[in-house]
């Protein structure tokens, strides 16, 4: 987006750059915000808020173990906001559900994202993120171990009259926190996460200011959310293939790659062909919705099917009107069940 070097982040003392700490209420409890780091930015609050909106809607930008965020609420009505900050008015509330890439390892997390404007000046803006947890629940790994995190944009004047914009990252440490100052040290995980978020805000905000436009639009054939949800289902359904892998090649690469291809093909057929009408005595379970999804009326051929895994996945999902074709047989073919081998991959 930009070749400009991101300014160094500076570890903050006990108060923010303006000399006043943040206080407020969180879930009916008085809290104090602890500044973690700050850096200079080159753009006003409007670009800052736009950058935060992008990060809120796309947390996967900053973590490879996050799949996406689903926006549940986007409102200027702040009646159910769990957060208040002294001297600031809430102006917008987004509630999102963060979806993990591996649901078997991390759970989803709902989070309130509140935009604040200063009551006394137009030179300051805050965006705060607050996780919603049930009593006794713990935060997933992808979320830092804090009760809330906030990003504060401040504008001041330099000695020569130029506008100086500063971004500060603040957190609310958990109640009863007994850690040492090492918890906020530059080598700590919390500091590294805050640094990564600050760098993303700097980069995206600078792109907003300079009018950056994406050169390529992705996910134009299938809806991204639909593909991701069905892929997670397919990955779980066919994960046993990894344990049964007989080849010397890496199963994590080849198996999940073919699962991804099969997911794309099945959804592409779903949206390309009409639904199937099945008789009530059809033995295929009707509680599996893909049994009624559209598919090529003349069947399909996987030319150069190689190990035959893609054909096997499609057949096991009920797409039996097709074959895999290759110049020579592969040893994996004999390991597939009869439903895949007949007709299954063939030599041609």
Image (cartoon, rainbow, N blue to C red):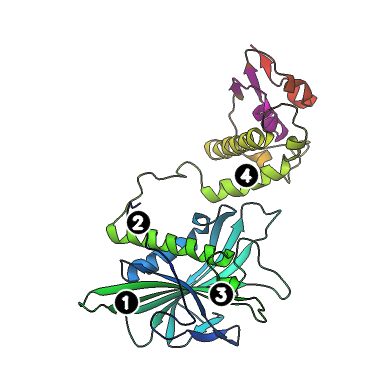
**Residue 155 got which mark?**
1
Q: Earlier in the sequence, mark 4 or mark 2?
A: 2
- Tell us which disc is closer to us: 3 or 1: 1
The tag earlier along the polypeptide, 4 or 3, is 3
Q: Nearer the viewer, residue 281 or 116?
A: 116
Residue 330 is situated, as x and y percent measured from the top left of the image, at 70, 18
Q: Where residue 96 appears, x then y in whole percent?
A: 55, 66
Judged by depth in the image, the label closer to the viewer, 2 or 3, is 2
Instruction: Residue 27: name its quadrant.
Output: bottom right
Q: Are marks 4 and 3 in contact (CB under 8 Å)?
A: no
Tag in front: 1 or 4: 1
Residue 270 seen in the current view: yes
Q: CA distance from mark 4 to mark 3?
A: 32 Å
Residue of label 3: 148
User: Which quadrant, please, contains the C terminus?
Assistant: top right
For marks 3 and 1, give the CA distance: 23 Å
Q: What residue did someone put label 2 on? A: 5
Residue 326 lies in quadrant? top right
Judged from the image, the secondary structure of the residue bearing numbered disc 2 is: loop
């Amino acid at each position: 987006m930009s070749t400009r070097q991101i300014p160094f982040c500076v570890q903050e003392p006990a108060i923010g750059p303006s000399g006043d700490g943040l206080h407020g209420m969180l879930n009916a409890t008085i809290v104090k915000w602890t500044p973690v780091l700050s850096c200079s930015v080159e753009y006003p609050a409007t670009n800052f808020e736009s950058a935060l909106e992008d990060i809120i809607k796309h947390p996967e930008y900053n973590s490879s173990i996050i799949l996406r965020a689903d926006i549940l609420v986007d409102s200027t009505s702040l009646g159910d906001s769990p957060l208040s900050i002294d001297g600031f008015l809430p102006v917008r509330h987004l509630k999102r559900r963060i979806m993990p890439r591996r649901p078997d390892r991390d759970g989803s997390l709902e989070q309130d994202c509140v935009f604040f404007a200063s009551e006394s000046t137009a030179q300051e803006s805050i965006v705060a993120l607050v996780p919603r947890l049930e009593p006794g629940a713990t935060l997933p790994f992808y979320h830092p171990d804090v009760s809330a995190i906030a990003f504060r944009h401040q504008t001041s004047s330099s000695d020569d009259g130029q506008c100086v914009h500063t971004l500060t990252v603040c957190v609310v440490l958990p109640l009863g926190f007994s850690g040492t100052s090492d918890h906020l040290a530059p080598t700590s995980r919390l500091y590294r996460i805050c640094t990564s978020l600050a760098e993303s805000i700097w980069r995206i905000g600078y792109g907003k200011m300079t009018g950056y436009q994406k050169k390529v639009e992705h996910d134009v054939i299938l809806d991204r959310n639909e593909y991701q949800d069905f892929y997670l289902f397919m990955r779980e359904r066919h994960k046993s293939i990894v344990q049964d892998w007989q080849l010397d090649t890496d199963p994590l690469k080849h198996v999940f790659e073919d699962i991804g291809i099969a997911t794309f093909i099945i959804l592409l057929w779903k949206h390309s062909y009409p639904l199937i009408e099945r008789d009530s005595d059809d033995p295929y379970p009707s509680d599996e919705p893909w049994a009624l999804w559209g598919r090529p009326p003349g069947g399909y051929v996987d030319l150069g099917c190689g190990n035959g895994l893609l054909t096997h996945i499609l057949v096991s999902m009920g797409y039996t009107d097709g074959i895999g074709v290759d110049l020579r047989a592969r040893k994996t073919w004999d390991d597939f069940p009869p439903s895949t081998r007949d007709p299954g991959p063939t030599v041609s």
